[in-house]
Amino acid sequence: MANLNNQLEKNYDPLKIEAKWYKFWEEKKCFAADPEAEGEPFSMVIPPPNVTGVLHMGHALNNLLQDILARYQRQQGRNVLWMPGTDHAGIATQNVVEKQLAAEGLGRHDVGREKFIEKVWKWREESGGTIINQLKRLGSSCDWSRERFTMDEGLSKAVREVFVSLYEKGLIYQGDYIINWCPRCHTALSDLEVEFEELNDGKLWDLEYPLADGSGSIIVSTTRPETMLGDTAVAVNGADERYREMIGKE
């Protein structure tokens, strides 16, 4: 039982005080959610931090706001579940591990698929543990007995089932689009994972292709004029009236 009779010290020492009280809260299961407990249920899932490193100031602010909400709901007598977890963040985590290998003069192909995956899981254990400890140091009142990881079998199965269901309903489809492609990872990247740079010193070249019958020409604009030597055909929009009569001509 915590001693509540000690005289308050002149200066607040967070290292001495916060760890003691958080341990007390955990021992008393103050944050545990009991399905049979009284009170209106209130639950929320933590936006799982990526296991790519350590938490930053954005995580601290976001989880502080969630913690305020969870604690407020408890004070209102509700049965609160704040469910914690971490995100595997596949591509980003792979890049972290590849940088570690690069520091040793190695690449993922040098160690092989199985060894590389082992290193990724080892990193997940190390980074994930650090993140959870950081959340606890922040005082986050999560139910740690329910901690999950996005690659857990139950969660992965749920994602697969939902994906297949949405595909069968026509809500997920495959098509041809301009995407961000990583030539090193050989995978598509979202806009959130790339950095856009505005180039002001680029040039746009106009190449004129004359028609073989001398009836005219077609102009193609490009930033890569050196590819002209490999050109074998010119594609046009068949619905564009300006080019309809050129279709099929040499």
Image (cartoon, grey):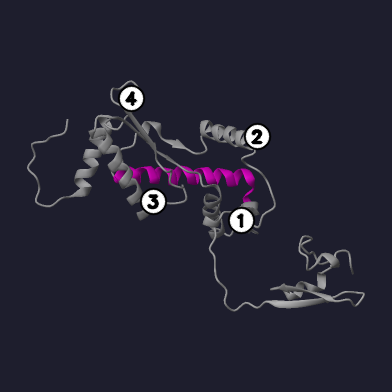
Q: Are marks 1 and 3 in contact (CB under 8 Å)?
A: no
The residue to which callout 3 is attached is 55
The residue to which callout 4 is attached is 34
The answer to which image quadrant residue 230 occupies is bottom right
Question: Identity of the amino acid at label 3?
Answer: Leu
Find the distance from the CA under tag 3 to the CA under tag 2.
38 Å
Examine the structure image and report whether residue 196 is included in the region drawn in magenta. Answer: no
Question: Identity of the amino acid at label 1?
Answer: Gly
Q: Nearer the viewer, residue 223 or 133?
A: 223
The residue to which callout 1 is attached is 107
**Label 4: few (<14), some (14–19) or many (≥20) C-alpha neighbours in 10 Å:** few
Q: Kindly state the secondary structure of the residue where label 4 is placed.
A: loop
- Give residue 168's mark: 2
Q: Are marks 4 and 3 in contact (CB under 8 Å)?
A: no
Q: Earlier in the sequence, mark 3 or mark 2?
A: 3
Quarter occupied by the C terminus: bottom right
Residue 20 in the figure: left or right of residue 231 = left
At horizontal 88% and vertical 64% (from top left) the residue drawn is 248
